[in-house]
Amino acid sequence: MFLQGSDLRGALLLEANLSNAQLESANLFKADLAGANLQQAQMLNVTLRRANLAGSSLIEADLKSANLQGANLERADLREADFLEADLSHASMLGVFARRVNLFMANMQAIDWREGVLEEADLQGADLRNANLSKAHLQDARMAGADLQEANLGGADLLDVTGLTFDQVASAQVDDRTRLPLYLRD
C-alpha cells in the first residue's frame, strides 16, 4: 500500500492491516491506529503526534525521524523496530514490548515506559530526561551517552546493560529494587 505523504489526520484505522505499507512523510496526527498491523511498514519522517497506537504491531517497522510526541503506544509490540532519531517525547508506552528496538539518539523526554521490555535495545545517545522507566526490563541494552537526568529507574532491571556510567545513574532516580550492572555495584 503506497500512502507516502498522505494527509491522514484523525483517520480511524482501528485494527487496519497496514503491514509493509509505504507511509513515508504521511501525516497521521491524532489518527486512531489501535490494534493495527504495521509490521515492516516504512514510516520514515511520519507524523504520529498524539496518535493512538495502543495494542498495535510495529514489528520491524522503520520509523526513523518519526514524530510520535504524546502518542499512545500502550501494550504495542515494537520488536526490532527502528526509531533512529525519532521524537517519542511524552509518549505513553506502558507495558510495551520492544526487544532489540533501535532508539539511537531518540528524544524520549518525559516518556512513560513503565513495566516495558527493552531488552537488547539500543539507547545510545537517547534523551531520557524525566522519563519513567520504573520496573522496565533493560537487560543487555546499550546506553552509552544516554541522558538519564531525573529519569525514574525505580525497580528497573539494568542487569548486563553496557555503556552505563556512575554519573548517568547518579543523575537518575533509583531505589533498592533497581538492578544495576555488576560493574556499577558497590
Image (cartoon, grey):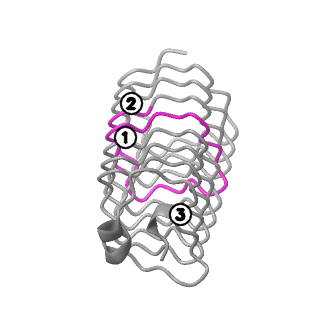
Residue at the spot of label 2: 26
Residue that label 1 marks: 47
147 horizontally vs 97: left or right: left
- SS for tag 1? loop
Amino acid at dot 2: Ala
Could you say where residue 58 lies in the image, as x and y percent from the top left? 59, 36
Q: Residue at x 58, y 24 (%)?
A: 40
Q: Report which quarter residue 129 is drawn in.
A: bottom left
Q: Say if mark 1 contacts mark 2, CB within 8 Å.
A: yes
Q: Is residue 55 magenta?
A: no
Q: Could you classify mark 2 by the number of other residues whose Cα lies within 10 Å: few (under 14), some (14-19), or many (20 or more)?
A: many
| Foreground disc of the pair 3, 2 | 3
Distance between the Cα atoms at labels 3 and 2? 44 Å
Q: Residues within 10 Å of mark 3 (few under 14, many from 20)?
A: few
Image check: 89 left or right of 157? left
Spot occupied by residue 156 in the image (x, y as percentages of width and height): 57, 69
Look at label 3 and name its amino acid: Leu
The CA distance from mark 1 to mark 2 is 6 Å
In the rendered view, would you say 134 is above or below 176? above
